[in-house]
Image: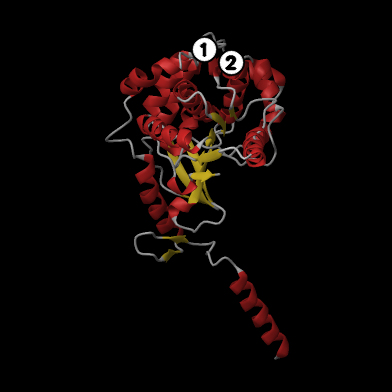
Amino acid sequence: NGSDIKSDQQLFRHLKQRDGIPSASVKDPTTGKQIFDVNEQFTCMIQQWKKIFDMHEHDPPKWDNFIQKYGQFEPGVHGACANPLTGEQLWTRAKKLKEDTAAGADGWKPHELKFIPRSAWDLRARVLALSLEIGEYPECYYTVNTHAIPKKNKGNAPLDHRLLAIFSALYPLEAGAFFDKLVPWLQELLHPDVIGALPNREGLEIAWDAQAFLEHAHMYGLPGVLSTYDFKKYFDSFDHDFVYEMMKHVGMPAELAKLTHHLYKNMRRVLTKGKALSQPFSAYNGVGQRDILSLIPALVLVSWQFKMLDILHPGVEKGAYFDDRNFRGTCEQLTKLDADIHEFDKAAGHATQPDKTEFVA
């Protein structure tokens, strides 16, 4: 009848206007076919992502070579607070937990920790102090659920997803408390033009500086050029041993660096889709997106590069929001700068994403 025809037309119109990417399947990049069986999806996802997570297994970045070449540009800042966390610090962090955060493998949602009485956090602080002393977390911390989130305006192949690590409920709270304690050290350590996760700074500062530079160059007819760089799979490319050595070098408390290193070296990742879980798998490299402590090496490496470039290319202005970097100068200056950026990135086990590198005049 007429209503059925109209309904069919509306459905066809809706399907035609979609972006054409199926939301219930994963595209096998080898065959080009769409996979709808969830277990086969997990197999394909793990197979493809292992190429990223194990990229450094046979040829890891050499810390000794890196520090020999670039150590002069970053002496580190030593004296960061190394005292164990107190029950008061844990309780204060618990009150900040958001209600919309997902539960990890232990089934607890982080915001549920708000209801634990204040006195219990003193006991928890003793457990955490023991973890720092022996260099290991409780066993349940090492199983980490990983949500695969499709990237906007991308396809549905495995590497078109962003993998978000969902830790045991207590870990993000304790990691956040450690981070809070390290903020003064980070503020002293980081290059002033590197921004991310620190109080009283925001990413708009970087965008404003870049925009103002271009407008000033256009207004006065100056030869100003802006270049932008983004890393390829930045968080997923960090080599665990390299990060451990880098954190010790720049002044992170040694016990915390060792504890975090042990967590990532022994982590068991589990992909999740709805209520389905994959088989656990390991990763030779990569730090967890959504782990606040993983922001520290991400910021430190960019800061280290900026300190090097200040000396080698003093006339170039720069700014970064985490790993989104921009450089401002003449075309000649930025062309010379480019080689040093790529060489530094490669030495640290990273690569720049070519399709996101732009030069704007």
Residue ID at (70%, 29%): 96
**Label 2 – label 1 distance at C-alpha:** 7 Å
Q: Where residue 118 is drawn, which disc sits there? A: none
Q: Which amino acid does label 1 sit on?
A: Val
Specify whether residue 13 is in view.
yes
Residue ID at (49%, 28%): 302
Residue contact at pointers 2 and 1, CB within 8 angstroms: yes
Quadrant location, the N terminus: bottom right
Specify whether residue 138 is in view.
no
* Relative side of 262 to 86, left or right: left
The quarter of the displayed image where residue 328 is located = top right
Please give the residue where the numbered disc 1 appears in the rendered image: 77
Residue ID at (36%, 35%): 284
Q: Nearer the viewer, residue 34 or 187?
A: 187
Q: Which amino acid does label 2 sit on?
A: Glu
* Relative side of 45 to 105, left or right: left
Numbered disc total? 2
Q: Nearer the viewer, residue 135 or 33?
A: 33
Please give the residue where the numbered disc 2 appears in the rendered image: 188
